[in-house]
Amino acid sequence: MIRDFIKSREAILVAALIALVLVVESRFSGFAAPGNLASVFNDTSILIILALGQTLVILTRCIDLSLASNLALTGMVTAMINAAMPGVPVAALIAIAIALGVIMGMFNGILVWKLDIPPIVVTLGTLTIYRGLIFLISGGEWVNSHEMGAAYKAVPRFELLGLPVLSWIAIAVIAGFAVLVNRSALGRAFYAVGGNPHAAVYTGIDVGKTRFAAFTIAGGLAGLCGYLWVSRYAVAYVDVAGGFELDVVAACVIGGISIAGGLGTVTGAVLGALFLGTIKNALPVAGISPFWQLAISGAAIIIAVAFNAQSSRKQGRIILKSAEHAQ
């Protein structure tokens, strides 16, 4: 089992992540300190949560490019409610954010399932729709920190056992996904649908419903992240998390989640997000312009896809050789 892990994509990612931290530490002392690494994890928590939601969608041979727009819309809605009605409990606002995110995820899922529209076309469309809705409901205005209640802004920052609640939420989502993907019938259905949709039908799995479930779960997580993002940074505006969908896809692909579907792990998605998050935290320390972040994310996607494609070819050759020997 240990030997299999050493040869796995996750082991390569762990080694790459450690090497990256050590390289940055060698140039900038203190980066590898436990407290700073905990801060890096906290900064990456939202990316981890969204990457896990995207993982489910990609496993079913789909993709959701609207997650960042979903996040921005739910964040704006909760911020506006909080500013207009400060007495609404934070728990109710979080529930509203998740429910709104679920509705947007369900909308994507229904269009893919019932109308059989390609997922990339659906989510490119809803990406624009959700951004447009933010402008319509806000009139292009910002909701700033002084308009938000103290309790609204406090939740992600509140520390429990030395870690902010935001980090604990990410840890809870990781644990929940480990159970969902590895121990449940729905988790097995995600892999079956992505691996071979036609064969999945013959085993009694409803491909459309499974993809609908993936979009719904991802949407709910995006809604949760909408509240977490806006409350943490204490500002809501139309372009919140603009371009963040690229980071989410990059984290999945770096983590070994196959765009072709049916292949990937929760551990891989988390490590991919952490790798990307560590790079993004290292860039300001190294004095590199944040405008390079999108270019780096795009380059990471291309390199990871090329690596995945090469690995698939090697695996295919091994299978063919085994078949030849068997004959």
Image (tube, rainbow, N blue to C red):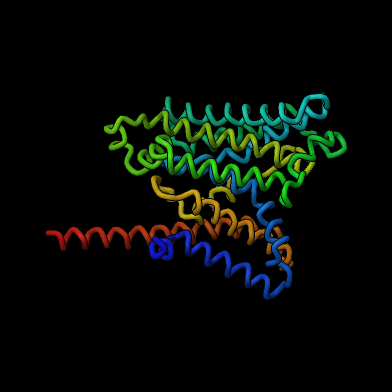
Where the C terminus falls, by quadrant?
A: bottom left
Residue 247 spot, x, y in % from top left? 59, 51
Outermost residue to the right: 146
- The part of the image, by quadrant, that contains residue 30 is bottom right
> Who's the residue at 51% across and 62% down the image?
13
In this rendering, does residue 243 appear at all?
A: no
168 or 147: which is nearer to us?
168
126 or 110: which is nearer to us?
110
- The part of the image, by quadrant, that contains residue 320 is bottom left
In this rendering, does residue 90 appear at all?
A: yes
Where the N terminus falls, by quadrant?
A: bottom left
Residue 70 spot, x, y in % from top left? 62, 35
* 252 sits left or right of 28 in the view: left
Residue 41 spot, x, y in % from top left? 66, 54
In the figure, 4 relative to 47: above or below? below
In the figure, 65 relative to 201: above or below? below
In the figure, 93 relative to 311: above or below? above
> Who's the residue at 84% across and 33% down the image?
149
